Image (cartoon, grey):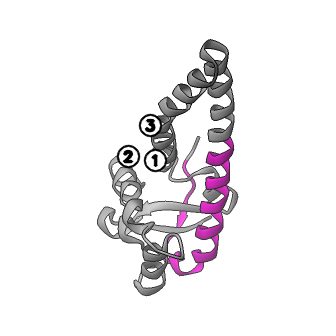
Amino acid sequence: MVRPTPRMETHGDVIGARILAFIIDSVLIGVVSFVLLLVFGALGAGLGGEEGAAGAVLLLAPLFIVLQYGYFIYLEGDRGQTFGKQLLDIVVVKEDGSDCDFGAAAVRNILRIVDQLGILVPYLVGLILIFLTDDHQRIGDLVADTVVVKTE
């Protein structure tokens, strides 16, 4: 796939799109996780009854973590966009306009752990930073020198 062309200096216009793209991506990951849970649970139950199903589900926990982070890291590192970002015509790029690479994608997404902090509101830290920083960046963007902008 060809990477989309970023429209630099549009990072202030994508806040709502970023949130909606994250929701779309989260639903997609949730559906895939649920299907995997059903399949592996059924396979485990077929092999070992309730204990087999429980064991299969426990084995999936690390896979779910890899799926959650790997989805974002791979797609943003490879094409600058997740499926949600692609649907909403936004892209992750370096602050200088160059492509987001795998290293930057890994940094910005591993630091989601910090962005996700919030007692009553998930992603409270990330949301506060997006609204307070000049380039509307969350902690992962600040460390990875990335911004999210519209595509042409």
Does the residue at mark 3 contact the one at mark 1 (Cβ under 8 Å)?
Answer: no
Q: Amino acid at mark 3?
A: Pro
- Most foreground residue, 84 or 119: 119
Does the residue at mark 3 contact the one at mark 2 (Cβ under 8 Å)?
Answer: no
Query: In the displayed structure, does residue 43 sit left or right of residue 108?
Result: right
| 3 or 1: tag closer to the N-terminus | 3
| 1 or 2: tag closer to the N-terminus | 1
- At 42% across and 64% down in the image, what residue appears? 97
Tell me the distance, in whole angstroms, between the alpha carbons under discs 1 and 2. 12 Å
Per the rendered image, the range of residues in magenta is: 3-31
Q: Quadrant of residue 134?
A: bottom left
Of the two numbered discs 3 and 2 in the rendering, the one whose residue sits closer to the viewer = 3
Q: Give the tally of numbered discs.
A: 3
Residue 4 drawn at (x, y percent): 57, 54
| 3 or 2: tag closer to the N-terminus | 3
- At 59% across and 74% down in the image, what residue appears? 14
Q: Is residue 29 magenta?
A: yes
The crowd level at tag 1 (other Cα within 10 Å; few <14, some 14-19, many 20+) is some
Identify residue for label 2.
102
Q: Quadrant of residue 19?
A: bottom right
Query: In the displayed structure, does residue 28 sit left or right of residue 92?
Result: right
Q: Secondary structure at mark 1?
A: helix
Q: Amino acid at mark 2?
A: Phe
Determine which of the numbered discs, if any, sits on residue 15 in the image: none
Of the two numbered discs 1 and 2 in the rendering, the one whose residue sits closer to the viewer = 1
Residue 79 drawn at (x, y percent): 52, 47
Identify residue for label 3.
62
